[in-house]
Amino acid sequence: ETPPIKPTDQPAQASSPPLPRQNVKVAPPSPPRIIKDKHKGQEFTRIGLLGEGGFARVYEVEDRRKSSLACKVVTKQSLKTKKAKTKLYAEIKIHRSLKHPNIVSFTDCFEDDDNVYMTLELCHNGSLMDMLRKRRRFTEPESRYFMVQLLGACHYMHNHQVIHRDLKLGNIFLDANMNVKVGDFGLAALIESPGERKKTICGTPNYIAPEVLFDTANGHSFEVDTWSIGVILYTLVIGRPPFQTKDVKAIYKRIRDNEYEFPADRIVSDFVQDLVQQILTPDPQQRPTLHEILDHEWFTRGIVPACIPISAHEVTPDFR
Ligand code: ADP
């Protein structure tokens, strides 16, 4: 049975073109209640399940000092192939090299007989995807707040030669103070020499840049993240992704034809429409740089809140 395609968050990777996997899932055994890092003599108490991703389960854990952390658990059972191991090592290598206030901080990693564990900064307020489901869509001031922090994180990654390749609302987390934290480096790539092009088809259908799907000979680079940021911006202010339709093939066709519109019944500013249109430029070389995005009038002539109240999960904040 083919799993239904959820609005935005089905990752697809390394097939051509990516289609949702037919995943018959057997729940792996839970990790022990006391998770031990034998080499460092550390212990973590497992509290509760935070979420499940493509190949990992993420738990809230407490260290001996009662500080809460997130712990990403990957079963060794799922790491039997060389490809799966290489993928996990790449994620660890990239994630642990990044230190930025808007990137989920990587604390440590270790293993026991059954699992590999990654301890991460805990994001108490879930993902922007969870929040959007409750709010339906965000105001433009809130969207500017999220975008400024996302652009900061992305600029830092690109300066460190990292392409995230799976930027989407479900991978943008919120800490206890509603700061943006970009997470999940499972599809991230390191550019090791200037001008290097990546060829692996990966990403999440709604957010994939056209060159990933349709310029496979030439490959892709940093601009794929810029494209996803354009999709994210549209989704924040409209409430659903621009190329969303019933099946993945139809989504890809709409991406290829640059076919999206701003619904007539929803009032969003001309500035935001212009910015989205600039970012969603099919030719990656013609897309604005991250600096140019921040210099757009949508940012410079609008309110950028310094913080967002926790109550924004339920009620629309008023920033007039
Ligand atoms: P995968 O790489 O398998 O997709 P993710 O890293 O996306 O796994 O994590 C899966 C889920 O776990 C997320 O959707 C989220 O609900 C939760 N999660 C992941 N990291 C954190 C974190 N640092 N803080 C809180 N929850 C998290």
Image (cartoon, rainbow, N blue to C red):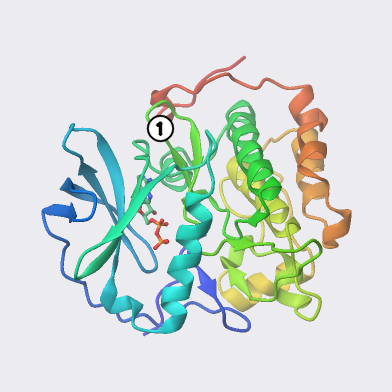
Q: What residue type is labelled 1?
A: His
In this view of the protein, which residue sits in the foreground, 140 or 151?
151
Residue at the image point whose x is 41% and y is 33% from the top: 175
Q: Where is residue 18 in the image (x, y as percent from the top left)?
A: 58, 78
Residue at the image point whose x is 74% and y is 28% from the top: 299
Residue at the image point whose x is 64% and y is 36% from the top: 152
Q: Quadrant of residue 268?
A: top right
In this view of the protein, which residue sits in the foreground, 160 or 310?
160
Residue placed farthest to the left in the image? 33
In this view of the protein, which residue sits in the foreground, 288 or 232?
288
SS for dot 1: helix
Please give left or right for residue 268 compared with residue 283 in the image: left
Please give left or right for residue 70 compared with residue 248 in the image: left
Q: Where is residue 31 in the image (x, y as percent from the top left)?
A: 17, 61
Q: Position of residue 94 (x, y in %)?
A: 53, 56
Figure quadrant of the C terminus: top right
Figure quadrant of the N terminus: bottom left
Q: In this view, does 243 lie above or below 266?
A: below
In this view of the protein, which residue sits in the foreground, 297 or 179?
179
Q: Is residue 17 above or below residue 232?
A: below
Q: For disc 1, does the CB lie below 8 Å from ligand 1?
A: no
Please give left or right for residue 106 compared with residue 289 in the image: left
Residue placed farthest to the front in the image? 39
Residue at the image point whose x is 67% and y is 73% from the top: 252
Instruction: Work out whether residue 186 can be spotted.
Output: no
Q: In this view, does 276 lie above or below 111?
A: above
How dense is the environment of label 1, judged by Cα within 10 Å: few (below 14), some, or many (20 and up)?
A: some
Q: Where is residue 9 in the image (x, y as percent from the top left)?
A: 48, 61
Q: Is residue 141 above or below residue 233?
A: above
Q: Name the residue under label 1.
A: 313
Please give left or right for residue 203 compared with residue 10 in the image: right
